[in-house]
Amino acid sequence: MYQIGEEEIEAVRRVIESKNLFRYQGGAGETEQFEQEWAAKIGTKYTLAVTSGTAALICGLAGLGLGPGDEVLVPAYTFISTALAPLAVGAVPILVEVDESLTMAPEDLERKITPRTRAIIPVHMNGLPCNMEAIMEIARQHKLTVLEDACQADGGSYRGQRLGSIGDAGAFSFNYFKILTCGEGGALATNNQAVYERAVYQQDGGAAFFQDMSDVKTPGFAGWNFRMNEILGAILRVQVTRLEGILAALRAEKKLLREALADASEFGLSRVNDLEGDCATTLSLLFESAERVKEVLERLSAAGVGAMTPINSGRHVYVNWEPILHQRGAHHPGRDAYRSTRVPVSYARDMCPQTLSVLARTINIATSIDRSPEAQQELITQIKQAVAAR
Ligand SMILES: *Cc1c(COP(=O)(O)O)cnc(C)c1O
């Protein structure tokens, strides 16, 4: 949670006083207006607000027509949700290495393609843009669809295009920990009408309440309920107005830190595929060895600096994805994607060694929107001292 306050309180008051808390109650309510505002911000024709980033991924995959027998390529470093979403629609996730940019490695992506591969989910992890040029080229060559996971990258961009608008669809999260927040929430963005309409069916129980069906062309089907409510829609409308300010503050701090640490010889500043579009939520330092990372982290922790290595980020690393490693894909065997694969898939804890090596050699330091200039200088000194001491 970066910034929330009086304006959001006013927005919630407005909704409660209106007594319209349900989005499909006739007229363009808060949620629908948020959808239009988010579509304008991201630069896509359609946006569908839903209850979480995971729901956005599931609606995106349903929208793209993914299902049993399909393989979906996901990075080995991402929040577990990215890998769970394919299972929810009956497809299986196949793990791809990340490179030193902490995002999907295009070379390994290409190696993991099989005749069953249907889609790629590149994840803009920690707000860092993926190498979308290489990924989109591979997708074109192999006729794969691309669903961007921009859940940690609200508002970021790659070569001037907003993240989430480059592939066939993009998923965003507004949970408590993300750049924009309404506590829990998400959105799917796309330029494709059929993908949007299918996503609508998925989020509203086969369009149980969705009202404006006049130009809908896609046949309906049974879906779930991921409908957003008007309180969250109203909060998000305020959050969108804060986006550029939040990103500007994060980027200014990261730039300052990178410049101050540019000549350090002990570590490298992790490669960023597009520095201008980076959301700059974290500064990543890449070391020679995992042992050095441990030493430096101990000193940073003793100095009170909030830093961590992504190898210890729990459910963000594939080795901690038990339902996937053990191939328990659903609550019932008849619904388990692992039982409907055309060719069995296998996973092992050591299957992505490059990912494990890069993560163990990286230190992530969170940037802040309101650190004072003095505190920023202090942080730079603490990082330099923690690295210098042996
Ligand atoms: C947070 C997150 C999600 C899921 O978002 P929820 O809103 O928590 O469901 C998916 N992918 C990534 C990379 C995330 O960080």
Image (cartoon, rainbow, N blue to C red):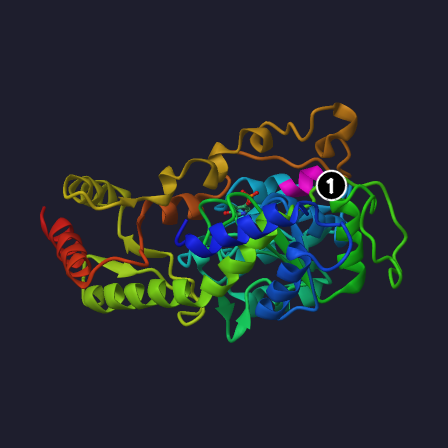
Query: x, y percentage for residue 320?
Result: 48, 33
Q: Residues within 10 Å of mark 1 (few under 14, many from 20)?
A: many
Residue pointed to by mark 1: 89
Q: What residue occupies the far left of the structure in this picture?
A: 389
Return the x and y of residue 387 as percentages of the image width and height: 15, 51
Q: Please count the marks in the image.
A: 1
Q: Residue at x 30, y 63 (%)?
A: 254
Please identify the residue farthest to the top as the structure is shown. Answer: 332
Residue lying at 75% horizontally and 50% vertically, measured from the top left:
24
Return the x and y of residue 330 as percentages of the image width and height: 69, 29
Task: Locate residue 265, reporting x and y percent.
Answer: 18, 62
- In the image shown, does 85 or 70 lie closer to the viewer? 85
Query: In the image, is residue 265 above or below residue 299?
Result: below
The boundaries of the magenta stretch are 85-91
Q: Pick out the residue farthest to the front.
A: 17
Q: Is residue 343 visible?
A: yes
Is residue 317 something one can see in this rendering? no
Label 1 amino acid? Val
Q: Residue at x 58, y 47 (%)?
A: 185
Q: Nearer the viewer, residue 79 or 43?
A: 43
